[in-house]
Image (cartoon, coloured by chain):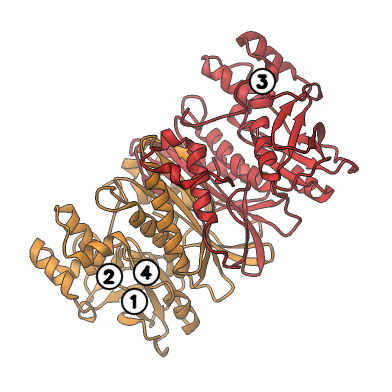
Chain colours: A orange, B red
């Protein structure tokens, strides 16, 4: 979970474990600590709390974001090949740059590995990272390797912020809400794999190699998006971040979403409401944005809701029952 | 161990574990894979293989480097406070920017943590990172948190490359070799702690919070350094990287090094040759550079050797007995 803005009081932390505090609580506490630092007017244009930070360096404006993937939590070696893991980890990072309206240029990778990992696995991982980065014209420019008990891949991505940068905190009352890219496919793949199945292949592949709509980030920014976010935790959970940061309410219309046939099939086979996969499934790295109501939406975008006053997320005007998305340390 | 340049043949990898290949072997294999990618003329001015990469982004030139620290391997929670670990991990990253002649501007942090970690430990870690970064005017601008079996801190640092950038591959036959900063102090602290002692306090503190001579990197670059590297593995080991990358021999004179009193004390108490600590101890993040022989060295720098033709590292003209520095997966 990335650092984000909140008003979590630091004083409640004393003697709590990370588990007791929760991942979200820890993240908000760390972010509050960083936010309390004096403003140095030092070229940090966007700090912690968005999909990526924006820093002025060497005369240019640079987007930067980091994501760590841990074996057994973010990927399983018996579910995904090393090449798949590389694609998946790179995609999570590259989508963060798209979600600011930027273009990714370079990645660095820190690989932690047990001594008994096949060396070929590390090379295949690198191949996946390289190939996914190449989708957007980005390169792996450096890295680090360390021994550890568990395979872990920490990736940092740098992007070009020379175009318009779109934050999550600037959605406006009266805007429309739109999405680009697939929703629920990776979650359906995860559900299938969790129950020991390997099909439908299209959703298993969606889990292994998400297909974020990278190009739609800069397209949305150029079209005048007021807020932009990537869907990594689940649509409702990530829209809740936009709603909280922008101090607005976002209402999503369930009938705005077509339910693709593979999600219907998974829902029927596993007894899951496919709409739940769409509304709460993360890891496809779709993009969600708000636009002023008079903007002609770019072709890759579909209107799914509207922004109003308040500070919550609703579906058809009602608070959604159950989890809005993924939580660690559950 | 950071990615670096080598000609390690990929074909020897088949079916080897990371342990069999060794950390250095894995790093060189991954780097070879990256080096085999087509040159896209895409703004990557320096790729994998130096202390940091240099990428042209958004109209500026950006230095970027990543380092991961793993509990039990790079730090111990019973030896170092969380604040100390923050200082230490930030220092390792910030020194990589200094070692290119650059100035660090921003860091992102990926923290992996077991659920039972005290939340206060994570906040204290952040405090240490923030304070060490402030030493050079850099900021923590973002991060990620994940659950894991082991505490790990992966940091990426971004720096300003608008001044002269000095690589490790450009030392010249006839140059002098010079160092800035402390050598052997952190290794002495590690030796003391390893045997269950907590004094001399100055070397234990040197292990817990290294004091890299950050400002000497840009100073050396401005003075005309031909090659520059930070001493993280040990002076001889890191000079060997310079020698290999530059295709030169570097000879170090043992009598060029004063042996500080605390190192004499640790040597006498533990039966260690203090010169071995100086020549092979890493983690102080001193800087080592080569300069043309006619350059007037900046005040922070001390001549310790000379560059000649060949491709090795010697001490007083002779190959050094024993390890030249730290190796993982030993």
* CA–CA distance in space, label 1 to label 4: 12 Å
For mark 4, what is the residue? A212
Residues at circles 4 and 3 in contact by the CB criterion of under 8 Å? no
At 19% from the left and 60% from the top, the residue drawn is A322
Say whether residue B104 is left or right of residue B67: right
Q: Residues within 10 Å of mark 1 (few under 14, many from 20)?
A: many
For mark 2, what is the residue? A183
For mark 1, what is the residue? A179
Say whether residue A118 is left or right of residue B288: left
Q: Residues within 10 Å of mark 4 (few under 14, many from 20)?
A: many
User: Nearer the viewer's eye, disc 1 or disc 3?
Assistant: 3
Q: Are marks 2 and 4 on the same chain?
A: yes
Q: Earlier in the sequence, mark 2 or mark 4?
A: 2
Which numbered tag is attached to residue B276? Answer: 3
At 44% from the left and 40% from the top, the residue drawn is B152
User: Nearer the viewer's eye, disc 4 or disc 3?
Assistant: 3
* CA–CA distance in space, label 4 to label 3: 52 Å
Point out residue A3 in the picture as x, y percentages from the top left corner: 45, 54
**Subunit of mark 4?**
A
Residues at circles 1 and 2 in contact by the CB criterion of under 8 Å? yes
Q: Earlier in the sequence, mark 1 or mark 4?
A: 1
User: Nearer the viewer's eye, disc 1 or disc 4?
Assistant: 4
Q: Residues within 10 Å of mark 3 (few under 14, many from 20)?
A: some
Look at the image and tell me in which quarter the N terminus of chain B lies.
top right
**Residue A11 visible in the displayed image:** no
Point out residue A55 in the picture as x, y percentages from the top left corner: 60, 62
* CA–CA distance in space, label 2 to label 3: 59 Å
Query: What secondary structure is found at the residue carrying circle 3?
Result: helix
């Amino acid at each position: 979970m990335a650092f984000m803005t909140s008003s979590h009081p630091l004083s409640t932390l004393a003697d709590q474990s990370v588990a007791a505090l929760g991942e979200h609580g820890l993240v908000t506490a760390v972010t509050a600590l960083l936010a309390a630092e004096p403003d140095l007017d030092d070229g940090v244009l966007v700090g912690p709390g968005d999909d990526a930070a924006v820093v002025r360096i060497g005369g240019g404006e640079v987007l930067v974001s980091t994501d760590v993937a841990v074996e057994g939590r973010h990927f399983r070696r018996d579910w995904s090949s090393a090449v798949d893991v590389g694609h998946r980890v790179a995609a999570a990072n590259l989508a963060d740059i798209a979600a600011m309206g930027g273009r990714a240029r370079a990645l660095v990778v820190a690989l932690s590995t047990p001594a008994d990992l096949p060396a070929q696995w590390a090379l295949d991982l690198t191949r996946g990272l390289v190939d996914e980065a190449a989708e957007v014209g980005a390169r792996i420019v450096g890295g680090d390797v360390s021994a550890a008990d568990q395979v872990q891949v920490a990736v940092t991505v740098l992007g070009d912020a020379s175009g318009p940068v779109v934050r999550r905190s600037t959605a406006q009352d009266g805007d429309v809400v739109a999405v680009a890219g697939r929703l629920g496919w990776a979650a359906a793949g995860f559900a299938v794999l969790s129950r020991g199945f390997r099909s439908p292949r299209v959703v298993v592949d969606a889990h292994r190699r998400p297909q974020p709509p990278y190009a739609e980030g800069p397209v949305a920014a150029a079209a005048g998006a007021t807020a932009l976010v990537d869907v990594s935790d689940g649509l409702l959970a990530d829209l809740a971040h936009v709603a909280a940061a922008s101090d607005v309410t976002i209402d999503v219309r369930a009938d705005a979403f077509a339910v693709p046939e593979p999600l219907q099939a998974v829902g029927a086979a596993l007894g899951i409401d496919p709409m739940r996969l769409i509304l709460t499934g993360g890891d496809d790295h779709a993009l969600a944005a708000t636009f002023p109501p008079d903007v002609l939406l770019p072709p890759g975008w579909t209107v799914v809701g509207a922004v109003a006053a308040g500070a919550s997320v609703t579906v058809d005007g009602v608070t959604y029952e159950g989890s809005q998305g993924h939580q660690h340390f559950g």
